[in-house]
Amino acid sequence: MTDLQNQIALVTGATSGIGEVTARTLAQRGAHVILLARNAAKAETTRAAIQAAAGHTQVDVLLADLADLDQVRRVAAEFNARYPRLDILVNNAGLLPSKERKVTPQGNETGLATNYLGPFLLTALLFDKLRESSAARIVNVSSAGYRLANPDLNDLQQERDYSQMFMYSNTKLYNIMFTQELARRLRAHGIQNVTTNALHPGAVASSFAGDSGSLLGVAMRLARPFMISSEEGAATSIFLAADPSVAQISGGYYVKQKPQAVKHSFNTLENARKLWQRTEQLTGTSFLG
Ligand SMILES: NC(=O)c1ccc[n+]([C@@H]2O[C@H](COP(=O)([O-])OP(=O)(O)OC[C@H]3O[C@@H](n4cnc5c(N)ncnc54)[C@H](OP(=O)(O)O)[C@@H]3O)[C@@H](O)[C@H]2O)c1
């Protein structure tokens, strides 16, 4: 199937798990795929494998650590200089933050920066290229773990009370709130050629949390035989990135390719607006204000 010929797709976290399958499938369906990765050696290996699987050479690598917002700015500038437009952006990269709180060169907590601030900034900086597409889709990989979120707008960085699990769950709720607020802002600005949706991929036997040294990492290793494959886990990302049936849908949260209600008391319109403003401050960007 080559239905994505002439489409330009950028997938973050494509060196492993769900992102690798997503990137490979989009390439096999004819898309020109750019892998955004932080590890050059892994990215080259992945690029070669995807090129071989896809049977074409339009698979590129851009290197950046999403947790480092200076690197995100640099890589967005590289993308903007090299490509005429962006048709599919899959914000897939994510990690379970470390047990002990760690900060990035900009002083942001690493999980918040990797899972939320980096993708927000990347999306904002690539937005002009998304607008160049006749029909662009932004897909944000969240998690059903959002249900455990316990956010504090006055302490997004958890400087007072750090918890690896709450930080992960919070970032995954922010991914959904970003998606919904972005959809509202796109509508308010009368922008019809860009849609955005979020998803939970399922419990996937990938490398996720494998090196986190946490109880969840141990639990995930033990549960691997009962978990779905990365191929199955990538299905909803690919569906939202490419299926004609969701071309006009925006602001949704999908599980197993079906829309699902988002149930969390923090997810109010007012909190979504405040979160957006606070994120603009933390990333030093202004986006669809
Ligand atoms: N696995 C699950 O059960 C599950 C469940 C719900 C949601 N999710 C979500 O699914 C997404 C993909 O996870 P996965 O299961 O495929 O995990 P994975 O196998 O660990 O893959 C994560 C990918 O993200 C990349 N990445 C991590 N931090 C990065 C950074 N700072 N900058 C750039 N790239 C970075 C990794 O790069 P390296 O190869 O360099 O490490 C890797 O390519 C995540 O957003 C996760 O939260 C997963």
Image (cartoon, helix red, strand yellow):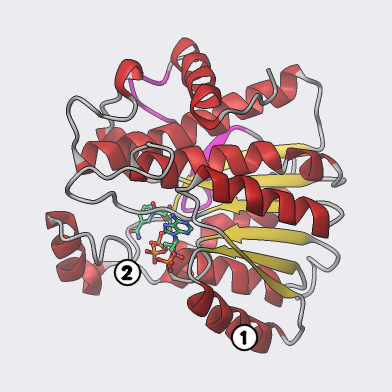
Residue at which label 2 appears: 205
Quadrant in the picture for residue 266:
top left
Q: Give the residue type at disc 1.
A: Ala
Res 259 seen here: no
Task: Point out the stretch of residues depicted in magenta.
Answer: 251-267
Question: Would you say the residues marked 2 and 1 are in contact, meaning their CB atoms lie under 8 Å apart?
Answer: no
Majority SS type along the magenta span: loop
Foreground mark, 2 or 1, reads 1
SS of the residue at dot 2? loop
Residue at 69%, 40% (x, y): give it.
Answer: 125
Residue at 15%, 69% (x, y): give it.
Answer: 222
Quarter in which the N terminus is drawn: bottom right
Q: In the rendered view, would you say 213 is above or below 97?
A: below
Q: Give the residue type at disc 2.
A: Ala
- What is the spatial separation of the Cα atoms under label 2 and label 1, in whole angstroms? 23 Å
**In-front residue for pair 209/3:** 209
Q: x and y percent of residue 177 in the render?
A: 48, 28
Q: In the rendered view, would you say 21 is above or below 142?
A: below
Quarter in which the C terminus is drawn: top right
Circle 1 Cα neighbour tier, 10 Å, few/some/many (<14 / 14–19 / ≥20):
some
Residue at which label 1 appears: 48
**In-front residue for pair 159/201:** 159
Magenta-drawn stretch contains 253: yes
Magenta-drawn stretch contains 203: no
Q: Return the residue found at the far front.
A: 105
**In-front residue for pair 72/174:** 72
